[in-house]
Amino acid sequence: MLRLAIQKSGRLSEDSLTLIRECGINFISSSYKLKTEATNFPLEILFLRDDDIPGYVQDGVADLGIVGQNVLVEAGFPDLEVEALGFSKCRLSLAVPRADAYGSVESLQGKNIATSYPSILGRYLAGHGVQANLHTISGSVEIAPSIGLAEAICDIVSSGSTLLGNGLREVETVFRSEAVLIAQPNLTAEQTDLLDQLRFRMQAVRRAKRSKYILLNAPITALDEVRRLLPGIKSPTVTPLAEAGWVSVQSVVQEDEFWHITSQLKAVGAEGILVLPIEKMIA
């Protein structure tokens, strides 16, 4: 049995549970329960405060955890990371009141900065030769300048709307973060095998999310160009159509390249282009 700790509520919790379900692992979750057990995989899920997860995993109370890199690094356990998961992306940024002048990070020399991440921020400032007074607070960091506690803040930013709503503007990116899978360093051989199985499933799900299955018809005269545009995993599947001179082509394209490739396919004569989601993709 593996014990996996995840955040008990919030967006990271929802995304983590979605990923586990997409890995084919079934379980029942409830807002009233602090742990649950999977019915078809040897996995127990613990619902904890995100700040506590790195410590629980380091101490072996939990075998695995899903947590933001920002929390992991701030806790001082970056070596626990085994897999970047690609969701819950955000950044830790410095922000100042919109009306204040700002030239560079050096202009924060001697200033008061409010943050929930003093370790990460302290290292960043030291790397720029800046000495500032860091005020560690656990929440509502954005209010600090307006109540006179600090001249600047350093906090997690996703869209920036919270900063805007509190009269602040983002001036420096200190750290970029995403959700990661972490593991305690003393797993047994059997637990390590289960971890490898879980990572294999997670990688298949993530690979599928980044890819699309594409089917199209193309004239044989354009086939070489179509194959150049659609390399696929090894090469595209090509099947003759009943209509002479035409073929059906099936392949996989990356989500980020899809629209650009589609326009190029149409330009060389491709027709009837169908695009389908991929549920799992095994490399």
Image (spheres, rainbow, N blue to C red):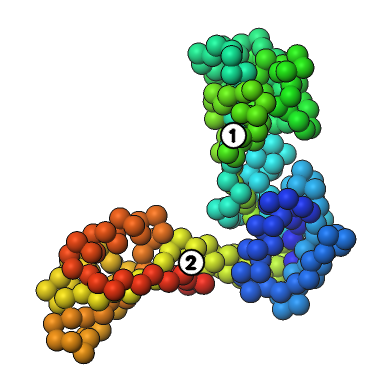
Judged from the image, the secondary structure of the residue bearing numbered disc 1 is loop
> Which residue is more in the foreground, 191 or 260?
260
Residue 208's label in the rendered image is 2
Q: Can residue 134 be seen in this view?
A: no
**Residue 168 on image: x %, y %:** 62, 23
Of all residues, the one furthest to the left in this rendering is 221
The quadrant of the image that shows the N terminus is bottom right
Task: Give the crowd class for mark 2: few <14, some 14-19, many >=20 residues within 10 Å.
Answer: many
What's the residue at 72%, 39% (across, down)? 75
User: Image quarter for residue 96?
Assistant: top right
**Residue 174 on image: x %, y %:** 57, 30
Task: Give the crowd class for mark 1: few <14, some 14-19, many >=20 residues within 10 Å.
Answer: few
What's the residue at 36%, 64% (across, down)? 253
Total labels drawn:
2
What's the residue at 68%, 43% (across, down)? 72
Residue 253's label in the rendered image is none
**Residue 81 on image: x %, y %:** 63, 50
**Residue 152 on image: x %, y %:** 65, 19
Q: What residue type is labelled 1?
A: Gly
Name the residue tied to disc 1: 160
Q: Is residue 51 visible?
A: yes
Residue 204 placement, left or right of 12: left
What's the residue at 54%, 14% (across, down)? 102
Q: What residue type is labelled 2?
A: Ala
156 is higher (above) or lower (below) than 196: above
